[in-house]
Amino acid sequence: MCGIVGYLGNEEKKEILLDGLQELEYRGYDSAGIAVIEGEKLSNYKAIGKLENLREKTKNYSSENFGISIGHTRWATHGKPTELNAHPHLGAYSYVVHNGIIENYQELKKELQDDGVNFLSQTDTETIVHLFEKKHKTANSVFSAFEQTIERLDGAYATLLITEADVDTIYFAKNGSPMLIGFNGSDIHFASSDTPIIGKASEVYYLEDGEYGYAKQGELKLFDANGEKSFTKQPLTADKVSAQKDGYRFFMEKEIYEQHRVMSETMMGRVLDNSIDFDEIDKSFFDGIKAIKICACGTSYHSALASAYLFERIAKVRCDIEIASEFRYKEPLLSDDTLFITISQSGETADTLEALKMAKRAGLKSLSICNVDNSSIVRESDAAILTRAGIEKGVASTKAFATQTMVLWMLSLYMGQEKNSISKELLQTEIDAMLHTPKALLVTDDLHAKLHRLSKRYLHGHGFFFIGRDIFFPLALEGALKLKEISYMHAEGYPAGEMKHGPIALADSELFTIALMPKTMHYDKIKSNVEELSARDATICAISPLPFDLADDFIQTKYDSHPMLEFFEMMVVTQLLALEISVRLGNDVDMPRNLAKSVTVE
Ligand code: F6R
C-alpha cells in the first residue's frame, strides 16, 4: 500500500506534495514525509500519524523555485510507524520513497552492513538508497547507478529517488506496485494513482511493470529490459469534484448515499428493455466456457460469493469462488474451459493481481470487474467490465460492493441470455427488478434517523453475528466486515442454518444478532434459525419487510418483490448501522486504524 508522489517543476512544491498525499492518504496513514531539492538546498520533513501532522510541521516552509521533490504516506509493513521508519529514507546524499515490498532486503541489508553502512530504520526501503549510493561510487553515471540498483531488487516496488549528485532529475522504477506519470507543459508529476494529478496534469502515462527511467528538464526518458523505449501519453479527463465530500461528514457516508445514483451509471447502456448488453465483451467471449472461477479479496470476495448463487441459478454455469491469497499457493487445478474472473475495486490488490497472472499462465481466458480503468488488473485481463462507481475514498468499501454485485447480476443474466439457459420471461422479470434497484438504494431521512437512534444500543456486548441464507449469507459476511473495520468490535457473518452447529453456544443477551430476513428467500427457514437464537436470549435486530415478534429491534424494509431488491436495501441498512456505531464510538470512519484502501502487498 502506501502512497507516493513526486514533482519536478517551478511551482511551489510543498503544497503540491501535501495535496497529492492528501489524495493518497487512504492508502496508508501511519506516517508521511517529503523531501525537496531546490538548487543545492535539500529539505526533508517527516511526521508520524495523519498528514495533518506533516502539514503542521511544514507550515513555515515553502519552496518557490525550480526543484525536484518526492513525498510518501505510509502503511507500515516493515517496522513500526515511527518517524525513523517514515519515508523518504536518506542515504548520505540521496532520498528515496517506495511502495511495495523488497523481498530480498535482508540479504541486501546484510551486504551493505558488512560494507559498513549504518541503517537508521527497520524498513526494507532504506536498502534502496544505500545500495544506490554504493553503486554510485563505481558507476559511470547516476542513472547507471540507479539502473544497477533496481537490477538487484526482488519483489514489488514503485520507487522514486532524488540525489544531490544530480539536482534536477527524479529517478523512478515500477514493478508490481502502481505508478503513473502526469504531464503539464514542462512540469512532471509522479503518483500512485491519478487522483493526486487530476487538475494538475493534462496528460498521463501509466507505467508498466519493469519500466524505469528519469525525468529531467521537462523530459521523460523511459527504459525497460530491452533499453530505451517510446511511450504514448493519454489525456487525463477525470473530474476533481467527484473526489470531494460534498457536505457529508465522511466519504463513506457520501458513498452510501450516492449508491442509488452510481447504480444507474453501472446499468447505463447495459440493461436494455428486454436484454442485457456489454460492449466490453464480444459475442464469442463465452465460446467454449463451461465453468467460472472468481478470485478476489475482502469486500470484493463477498460480492463474488453472492454471484456464485446467481451464475449457477440463472446462467446454469458452475461457479467456484476463491480468496485470492489462498488460491495463489494451493497449486490449483485449472482447465482452459474455465473463465477466470477477478473482482477488485482498486484494480491494484496484489493477491488478486497475482492470482490473475497465474490463471493467465495456465491459459485461462480472463475477465476483470473493476472500478479503476487502466489499473493493473484491468490491463492484465483479456476483457474488463468497469463498475462505474466513481472514485471510492472511504476505506470501508460500500458503493464498490454494490456496483460489483450489480455487474455480476447483469453478467449472470447476460451469460444465461447468450447460452440460451434462461427463459425470456425470467430474463424480463430480472430486468424489471434491476431497473428498480436505484430506488431500493435510496437512503431516506427516516431510515438514517432510525439507525442513528438504534446504534446507541450496540456499543458494547461481546460480539455480533450477522446471519442470512443464500445470497444473504455473503451479505451477512459483508455487513460484519463493515462493522468490524470501522467499529473495531468483533463481528462475524454466518450462514443462518449453520449457527446450530456450534456458534449458538455463544448466544446470550450480550450477543447481538443482526438477522437478514428477506421475504422472498427462505423466509420460514431463517425465521426458525432466528427463533432458536432468541430462545437462548440472544439480542435480535431483525431486518425484514415482515414484522417479527421476537425481535428486540426491528428495521422494516420496503422492497419485497425480488431477492436482489431486498439484498440491496438490506445492504444499505447494514452499511448505515456500521457507520452510526463507528461515529458514536468516536472512530475515524474514513481512515480506520490499521487499514489502507489499496492493498498492494501480499
Ligand atoms: C473492505 C475493503 C477491503 C477490500 C479488499 C480488496 O471494506 O475495502 O476488504 O475489498 O482489500 O480490495 P479491492 O477490491 O480493491 O481488490
Image: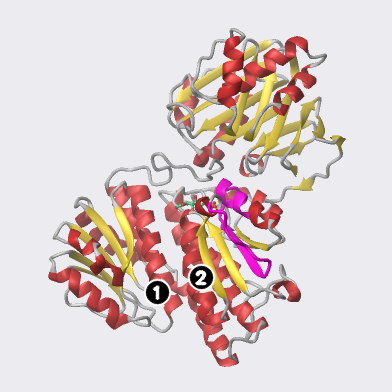
How far from the left and from the top, in percent, is residue 173? 71, 32
Q: Residues within 10 Å of mark 1 (few under 14, many from 20)?
A: some
Q: Residues within 10 Å of mark 2 (few under 14, many from 20)?
A: many
Q: CA distance from mark 2 to mark 1?
A: 10 Å
How far from the left and from the top, in percent, is residue 546? 28, 80
Q: Does residue 197 belong to the magenta stretch?
A: no
- Please give the residue where the numbered disc 2 appears in the rendered image: 307
Look at 69% across and 18% down and name the residue there.
Answer: 132
The secondary element bearing badge 2 is classed as helix
Q: Is residue 463 left or right of residue 589?
A: left
- Please give the residue where the numbered disc 1 appears in the rendered image: 470
Quadrant of the snapshot with the N terminus: top right
Q: Quadrant of residue 471?
A: bottom left
Q: Is residue 356 left or right of residue 187?
A: left
Look at 56% across and 81% down and name the residue there.
Answer: 316
Residue type of the residue flagged with mark 1: Asp
Q: Is mark 2 within 8 Å of ligand 1?
A: no
* Vertical comparison of 47 with 416: above or below: above
Q: Does residue 334 belong to the magenta stretch?
A: yes
**Region rendered in magenta:** 330-356
Residue type of the residue flagged with mark 2: Ser
Q: Is residue 101 left or right of residue 152?
A: left
